[in-house]
């Protein structure tokens, strides 16, 4: 099967385009990676080259040894993925130590994987451990309203989680474990990768202050839906704060407990504090 005919590749391309249409990917902003299933790799193996040069990842991810990933390219624009996928995205293989990668398909014209590859791979490794391998997608986007909130809310997991939970009833059902937040850090390096992966041991969403969001999920629909839900809640909160700084009514801690019981989710009590 040709790579571009594969269902998982078509899903990847659609998600890139969906993010572009939401306005989350100005210029070359944001990145997406997908850990391929063995049967998917086997289906497209005839188009996977084995003569690419091995290059250092910059971090060690031994649990990803031998895995294949579909990735967006560094400096590539999400708006161009649907128009020219072989230039904008690629498939990379991880070596037997989890320390190097090589390009097996795509990223033509001397392209290379996203500069956030270390952060993505460290988070993939963490999510393999904490989800038993169910999570395969890591998505980073520059979500406008979430970024705006990082200038006015305390950069604390409890505060962001509680404020966004209160904005829409579905929020504690969609992200019941809460949201992690990290202070501003230089993107693309080992430090931010380590800080993000530590948060992702607890959460499926981590906010990078003044930068955007990282989200993890089992497939493209769930991961995009998670990002979309958090950003929509942030949009409601921004609008509410622009109308007046205090709430006249809201969802209470007991309301959340009742919701959790009916929807059979567990909501950590640390987020249900009395204000």
Image (spheres, rainbow, N blue to C red):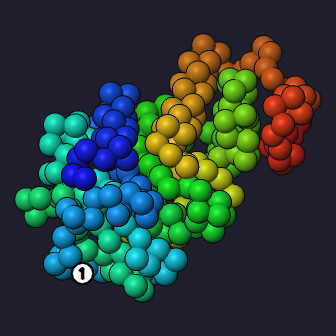
Q: Is residue 78 left or right of residue 233?
A: left
How far across and how far down the image is residue 226, in percent? 56, 38
How far across and how far down the image is residue 120, in percent? 44, 62
* Residue depicted at 32% across the width and 58% down the height: 43
How far across and how far down the image is residue 108, in percent? 11, 58
Q: Nearer the viewer, residue 262 or 231?
A: 262
- Looking at the rendered image, the quarter that the C terminus falls into is top right
* Residue depicted at 33% across the width and 36% down the height: 14
The crowd level at tag 1 (other Cα within 10 Å; few <14, some 14-19, many 20+) is: some
Q: Nearer the viewer, residue 143 or 82?
A: 82
* Residue depicted at 42% across the width and 86% down the height: 97
Q: Secondary structure at mark 1?
A: loop
Q: Quadrant of residue 212?
A: top left
Q: Is residue 273 visible?
A: yes
Vertical arrangement, residue 140 with respect to residue 17, above or below: below
Vertical arrangement, residue 132 with respect to residue 230, above or below: below
The residue under label 1 is 54
Q: Nearer the viewer, residue 150 or 56?
A: 56
Q: Is residue 170 left or right of residue 42?
A: right
How far across and how far down the image is residue 36, in percent? 41, 59
Vertical arrangement, residue 80 with respect to residue 270, above or below: above
Q: Is residue 213 visible?
A: no
Q: Is residue 47 left or right of residue 66?
A: left
For this orientation, the residue located farthest to the left is: 109
Q: Quadrant of residue 46?
A: bottom left
């Amino acid at each position: 099967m040709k790579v571009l005919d594969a269902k998982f590749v078509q899903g990847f391309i659609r998600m890139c385009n969906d993010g572009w249409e939401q306005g989350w990917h100005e210029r070359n902003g944001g990145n997406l990676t997908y850990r391929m299933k063995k049967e998917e790799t086997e289906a497209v193996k005839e188009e996977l080259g084995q003569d690419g040069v091995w290059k250092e990842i910059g971090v060690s991810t031994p649990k990803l040894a031998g895995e294949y990933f579909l990735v967006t390219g560094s400096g590539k624009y999400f708006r161009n993925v649907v128009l020219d996928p072989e230039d904008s995205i690629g498939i990379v293989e991880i070596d037997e130590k989890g320390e190097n990668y090589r390009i097996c398909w795509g990223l033509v014209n001397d392209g290379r994987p996203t500069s956030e590859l270390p952060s993505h791979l460290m988070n993939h490794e963490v999510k393999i451990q904490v989800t038993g391998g169910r999570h395969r997608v890591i998505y980073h986007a520059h979500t406008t309203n979430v970024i705006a909130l990082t200038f006015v809310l305390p950069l604390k997991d409890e505060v962001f989680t509680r404020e966004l939970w209160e904005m829409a009833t579905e929020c504690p059902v969609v992200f019941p474990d809460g949201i992690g937040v990290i202070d501003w850090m230089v993107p693309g390096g080992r430090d931010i990768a380590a800080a993000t992966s530590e948060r992702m041991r607890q959460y499926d969403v981590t906010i990078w202050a003044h930068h955007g969001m990282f989200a993890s999920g089992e497939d493209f629909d769930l991961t995009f839906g998670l990002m979309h839900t958090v950003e929509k809640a942030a949009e409601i909160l921004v609008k509410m704060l622009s109308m007046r700084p205090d709430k006249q009514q809201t969802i209470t801690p007991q309301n959340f407990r009742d919701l959790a019981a009916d929807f059979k989710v567990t909501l950590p009590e640390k987020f249900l504090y009395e204000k």
